[in-house]
Amino acid sequence: MKILLHAFLISFVFFFLVGPQMAKADSGGLSTFVAVDLVGEAFVRSRETSSKEAQIRGAEVFFAAPIDPVFDGTLGIAAHPEGGVSHFELHEATISSSKLLPYTQIRLGQGFLSIGKLNRVHQHDWPFIEAPKVHTSFFDSEGVNDVLLEGTVNTPTELPLEFTLGVAKGWVYGHAHNEGKRPLVPTHYTRVQSFFELPGGGGLQFAGNYLGRTDSNARRTRLMGLDITAKWREGRALAFFLQSEIWLRQVKNPGVDREDTIGLYVFPQFNVTENVDFGIRGDAYSVLSSKDALGNKIENASSEIVPTVTYKPSEFSTFRLAYSWQLEQRGDEVTRVADSRLQAQITFILGSHPSHDF
Amino acid sequence: MKLVSIFGILAILVISLFPAACSKPSESKSDCIEGGKVGVVCFKSLSSPALSFSSGTINGTGSALAVGELATETSSGKNISVAFSLSDEGSLTLKTYSKPDLSGGVDIKLSRAGTKLELKFVKGATESSAKELVGIDASSEVKLIVDVHNDEDPAHILVWNGSGTFALETPLLDSEDDDVKPSGQGLDKYWGVTLANAKLTQAVLSEPKKED
């Protein structure tokens, strides 16, 4: 018991007192932060699910620092609730270097795969509260995390191009409660990204993505997707922000027809006042190959509209309120509003958060 | 920038109309010509002689395929609430995430031995050991609530007593914590039942009770 108390006190002193001071004292050295993500729901109207209790969706402790003149290291541990209990899991433990090969960054260890947009960003940094269905279905509620080796090459050309090639262990993919099994073909992925400036001080980042794997049961999965992020700044304020992804998933089990599913989301966000943004996310999702047991095609689609207000007094705290409407259509049955709910989120960061990708 | 704002709003409008835009009413299956209905689920007999469909029940020995999909996607979860009666030594097998011929799925076999009800998982010729579902009287009508999470490997199965008050945290079987578990995942998204001296009186699909 005393050991636990001492461990708690040492952790408290480090994370809340020493860590931030170290981050301030040596900005080129150890970066340490603690990020907390609280979410809650109200006014739930649903055919199937009930309101979730307000909960700490994520509490993450993160360290990043140069190991030596050649290598950098990261360690991130996050707690997420499951079955009413918070479980700590390893989010990131990587060693990386941009000094071994020219124009090349190499990353080895456990982390989120560098593919798509949301999958590369931690949950507490998303521009909305919940992930769109295309992300939760094709990746996971947060993202695909695995032991990986990836290389990213930046070409020294006028039009900047960034090629990422990675391979991950692939024993499991997405949500799992066990260690999984050795895949026939491990998870492999590539991303080709570029950027160009837009008139009026804007910028556009866009990328094509591919992921493939064949699991131990010979189930073959392929994902192909495009993601774009556009920003216009006026002074320091982000006047307009647009984030969108579109993905096609093909799943082939032995001896059955291939299952093709398409999903996308578009999230434009406008700056209303200095610290307040308003955005509206639209999602769409459909299984293109859906048919009944007699071979008759079943039309199906689901979509979601999520207006979101964000109050962000600084980069260290965010208060968000959103209302979501889900619409479903399946065969003859069209449900105009299958599910609606009010969602709230508070995130805060203690310490020094590393800078984000564009 | 205004142009981009307009593009964004237009994109949202297009997406919001997506279900309607994709909506071409498919051929109505409400008549269920080739079989019989249990509740709103249309079943087609795969056996010869055919199973007996009457008054919203299926009775006898043989297999029946549900015409609609169990789920839109194979990697998904679904809940099936069933009510059935078994003759002594009779059984009912729930065939989930199967091919249209009811092979290749996660099969949950429920067998009666006197007043006891036993559950085992079947995959091809392989059977798991059996587990008695304690508290169920198999000599009268049995009601079970079954979660099948086929987005996990092996598929995660939870079974609750469907009689009385539903208690999420006290399933009769949770294959994740039990030695009795399926050996893999289902390959497709169809489902049905195989009866052996049994009568199916209720079959209702919904979203899984347990979130993962």
Image (tube, coloured by chain):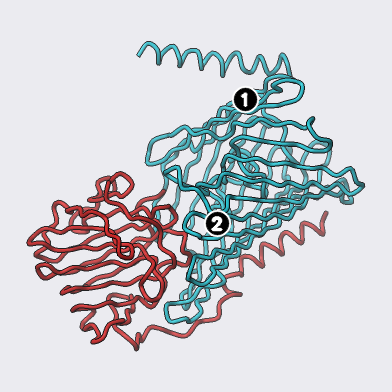
Chain colours: A cyan, B red
Residue B3: x %, y % from top left: 82, 59
Residue A237: x %, y % from top left: 78, 39
- For the residues beneath circles 2 and 1, the answer to whether they share a chain is yes
State the SS at label 1.
Answer: strand
Residue A138: x %, y % from top left: 56, 55
Q: Earlier in the sequence, mark 2 or mark 1?
A: 1
Q: State the mark number for residue A63.
A: 1
Which residue ends up furthest to the left in the rendered image?
B114
Query: Where is A293 relative to B160, above or below?
Result: below
Q: Is residue A334 left or right of residue A107?
A: left
Q: What residue is at 20 percent from the left and 53 percent from the top?
A: B131
Question: Which quarter of the image is occupied by the N terminus of chain B?
Answer: bottom right
Q: Chain of mark 2?
A: A
Q: Quadrant of residue B29?
A: bottom left
Q: Which one is in front, B9 or A245?
A: A245
Q: Is residue A299 left or right of residue A24?
A: left
What residue is pinned by disc 2?
A: A214
Which residue ends up furthest to the bottom in the rendered image?
B33
Query: Where is A11 relative to B61, above or below?
Result: above
Spatial CA span between label 2 and label 1: 33 Å
Q: Quadrant of residue B115?
A: bottom left
Which residue ends up furthest to the right in the rendered image?
A158
Q: Chain of mark 1?
A: A
Q: State the mark number for residue B187.
A: none
The crowding category of the residue bearing disc 2, from other C-alpha atoms within 10 Å (few below 14, some 14 to 19, many at least 20), is many
The crowding category of the residue bearing disc 1, from other C-alpha atoms within 10 Å (few below 14, some 14 to 19, many at least 20), is many
Amino acid carrying label 1: it is Phe
Question: In this orientation, does residue A314 appear?
Answer: no
Q: Which one is in front, A54 or A58?
A: A58
